[in-house]
Amino acid sequence: MDLLLLLTLFPLLSALPLMLPIKAFNCRKTVWSYALLSTLVTFVFSLIVAFKFDFAATGTMQLAGSLSWVDAFGLSFGFGIDSISLWLVMLTTFLMPIIILGSLSAVKMRVREFYFWMIVLETFMLGTFVATDIIFFYVCFELTLVPLYILIGVFGSDNRLRAAKIFFLYTFSGSMLTFAGVMYVAFVNSVNTGVWSFDIQTLYLAAAGMSLAEQSWVLGALLAGFAVKVPLFPVHTWLPLAHTEAPTAGSVILAGVLLKLGTYGLLRFALPMCPAAVVEYAWLIGIFAVLGVLVTALICWVQTDVKKLIAYSSVSHLGFCVLGLFALDIDDAGAVGAVMYMINHGLSTGALFLCIGMIYERFHTRDMAKMSGLGRVIPVWASFTVFFVLASVGLPGLNGFIGEFLTLIGAFLSPSNVLGVEYAAFAGVGMILAAIYLLYMVGKVIFGPLLVPDVHNDDGSHELNDLNPREIFTLLPLAAACLILGMLPHGMLASLEAPVGRLTASAKDAAELDTVFVEADTQGTPLRLAVDDHASVSLHAPLIKTAPRAAER
Amino acid sequence: MHKAEMIQKVAGLWPEIVMLIGATACLFIGLSKGKGPRRSTPWIAASTLVIAALMVCNKSGTTDEPAALAGMAGYIKLAVAGIGLILLLVAAGVPNRLRQSLDAETAKTFEPGDVMTGEFYAFFLLSLTGVMLTAGAGDLVWLFLALELTSLPTYVMVATSRDRVEAQESAVKYFFLGALSAAIFLYGFALIYGATGSTEFTEITRIAQEQIAANGGTPPGLLLMGMVLAIVGVCFKIAAVPMHFYTADVYEGAATPVTAFLAFVPKTAGAVALILLLSLVGWPLPAPIASLIWLIAVVTMTLGNVLGLLQDNVKRVLAYSSIAHSGYILVGLLAGPAVNEAAGGTGGALGDGIAAVLFYLVAYGLGTIASFAILGCLRAGDREAQTYKHISGLHKNHPFLAALMLISVLSLVGLPPLVGFLGKIYLIGSAYGAGYTILVVILVLNSAISAAYYLRIASACYFGEPDESVVSAGQFPRYAGALIAATLAIVLGIVGNGLVNASRNATTPTQSADTGHLVQQTAAATATTTQID
């Protein structure tokens, strides 16, 4: 059996016994241990996959395979990974056991269901990252909605019904348009080749032949689904609600992995499928990304609910990610940084949500006005929180810095007909704001005069305890990962360059052609067709395009 | 008709003949005095369906029928017999529950004579026979009679399904509007006959093509008028605008299992009739007819979904959802058989709108029947469970039913990889193939709207507080029907190859050598026709 298939299906299969009438699962701890074991085994599988993965290989997809689905439609369950997928798979399988570990005391009723849906969700998340058939991707992309919808709706806090419904409808409506766009590309392919196929590589070729107008519509359709998922600035409004109402585990998985489906979709589909349109509209997307960074950073500043603050900070941070993806700079600093950012944001923001969950379990409140100076009474928790806040802010030496820096470099070096210095400059202000609101939160909650809310422990006592060993073990791997990725990012960056380069190549070509045309138009020089020589350009000698911006913009 | 032709035609009708024999048997055995024989009628109906299905299977491929869409009849007959079995499971027990369903104060002593076991199943089989005959129709008169055979028994089924005045009210509404629609499409048929001088499809097709070609791509006035009236009249059967007004009231008033029947059987007959009628003028449809169907499709799906949002009664919600699905089906009808590729080409099934419609009918049928069956499994005190309040918190007391409900509404909304999703791919692929890009966007936006009310059903089941007055109706077969339908919705989604190929083969003209090269026939007439958008 194919390793990837096993990795993807194992969580689903291991979740099924939880729904069978097995007496042992009536005990909360047994279910929890079972779930933990299942996710750990999945993690081991993913390690084996990583071990088998050849980072030096130049081919497109590794460990690839396919199961037939509906042959008459050209549909298949095709799977395979490149290093982008691999890192995201690793992120998912790494986060899952941690989340389960952290959920023992948080979930007390309908325990079986909780872990059932959590594990099922893992299968769908892995499915999106390993899919090489676009409908298979879409299937998993949509199916992630159902488990999270139930997790929020059943296990969330007071306003959970509204949050679950808005979450589902918002993302589903967007992705229906994405579906129409994908079908359109497949249709173009069927007209060109006479055969319907949904293989991603095949569709890249078909999409390359589409006119700018067609590409623009397809880009719009893809953005409708993926920008909502990211979420990009004007369509982010579902996220704070979903985050605040979701149980801790749901928030971690949402921030850690599910939001990345949006950026992953943009990278995997939007950039290679509509390169010309991406170049044409990068400025608009860039503006929304920068606006998102700034506006939500300002919103963060005025939050009193700690969880909501972190939720908005996700929107702000993912603005950088989108900015990096659409930078199209010649060395892919932006796009590689964006992928790095996806991993890092998953780790540090996920960890912050876990920290807040731990506080909430003790105090049953997340109101910043009611807590202050907690560093004095629960120093271990405070140390971890400060650590993750620093990782999130982008302290050099921790993981957040690398991605943020690279995305800004990318925007800075971006060809002038795509993004440019002004985008990087404004987004840079966002970095400062991020430092302000996160450190403001730290200063308020961890330092300052001592103010401890009422404590409600499980056993009915009202004594404030610092983190227990289980909770420390929940946060420790995350902290270690943040540190390691911060100190030694080279391996990861090197592995990402080639696959990211493949995905952005056509858009970069389009950007260059655009520049050439502009130059030709403005200076009357003959067309200079300089493409496909990017490989020789090294990171030290970035090639900055200085052609004037197209007049019509 | 020539004698040999007659014999051949009748030879192709054995499944229908078996169904008629079964119906008659149910009718007479249902009159017997003893309880035992009367109890056997559902079993007789079931075995009739099984035998009919087997005969369809056995026959397919051996004789070619003189109809344009030769494979379609076999596909529809099999689908109707198969889904008929599920419907029978769901409906079993409707007639003998009547007296027990009354509350304690008004309950009369049980009178065996009142139990109408026999008639109910006889009408059930007759209506299904009507759909089968519709699919095999090759003549306008035949088509009219088949459509009426489908509908007439349903009026009685609605009226007798519940011991409440609502059921009678529904039946009267349904009957009068049904009669009106029959008059309209009969008038249309008459005009088509007047325009072409024949009632036989092959003859009408030939003459209509000539007239259309002579008239510069649009049908001449009389033919156009006939087609429009026929289409609008048949819209009643599929519950499409402007003939949709009865749907919510009738679906609400009928007993839930009968509603499941109404949502599938007449709709299938109507869709098949529309395929046959539109094939008379051929695809791509002449501009006026294409515009009409485009408009009906858009208005139907939008109206159905928007009104579905406003309802509090789940049966009405599902009724409006069924209207919306008719809109989707019309998209496939508008697109027609694959035009971009040669008939029976290697391009696969996507792009073939008629095959998409045939597939979608099954996909929709499974989801809708499952959700109605689940509602039918519940009782709120002495009444039917109908509102959101009744299914609220279903998960707590009936986790099994709640899970089935979740699956069926997700299939209806088109969530992958359930069968409804494959249906959407099929329809959208065909609409793109025929060049209706805007229609695709409208369709997906409508799917997004519909998600709101489907999700409300799922939310009620999973997140609500249980209504303690709601109890199980204790109908084991109905559970089984819901289970089978919902399971098929998953299985056919993941292992969809068989059904997709079957629907594709049903419309691929290469199977019957003599006739049916519909696409090629009409290709000549396409040069001058235009499409909207």
Image (cartoon, coloured by chain):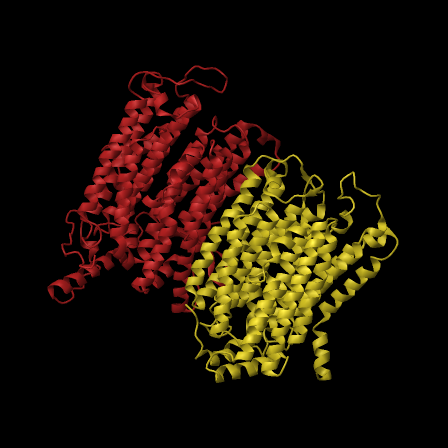
Chain colours: A red, B yellow
Q: Position of residue A186 (x, y in %)?
A: 41, 62
Viewer-closest of A553 and A513: A553
The answer to whether A459 is drawn above or below residue B295 in the figure is above
The answer to whether A147 is drawn above or below residue B325 in the figure is above
Q: Position of residue B71 (x, y in %)?
A: 60, 71
Q: Position of residue A224 (x, y in %)?
A: 37, 51
The quarter of the rendered structure image containing the C terminus of chain A is bottom left
Viewer-closest of B322 and B242: B242
The answer to whether A342 is drawn above or below residue A59 in the figure is above
The answer to whether B341 is drawn above or below residue A155 in the figure is below
Residue B43 shown left or right of residue A100 in the figure: right
Q: Position of residue B335 (x, y in %)?
A: 49, 68
Q: Residue furthest right?
A: B33
- Could you tell me how many numbered marks the image carries? 0
Residue A27 shown left or right of residue A465 in the figure: right
At 34% from the left and 56% from the top, the residue drawn is A219
Viewer-closest of A301 and B21: A301
Whether residue B89 is visible to the viewer of this picture, yes or no, is no
Whether residue B427 is visible to the viewer of this picture, yes or no, is yes
Place residue A533 in its image quadrant. Answer: bottom left
Viewer-closest of B46 and A332: B46
Residue A456 shown left or right of residue B90 in the figure: left
At 18% from the left and 58% from the top, the residue drawn is A550
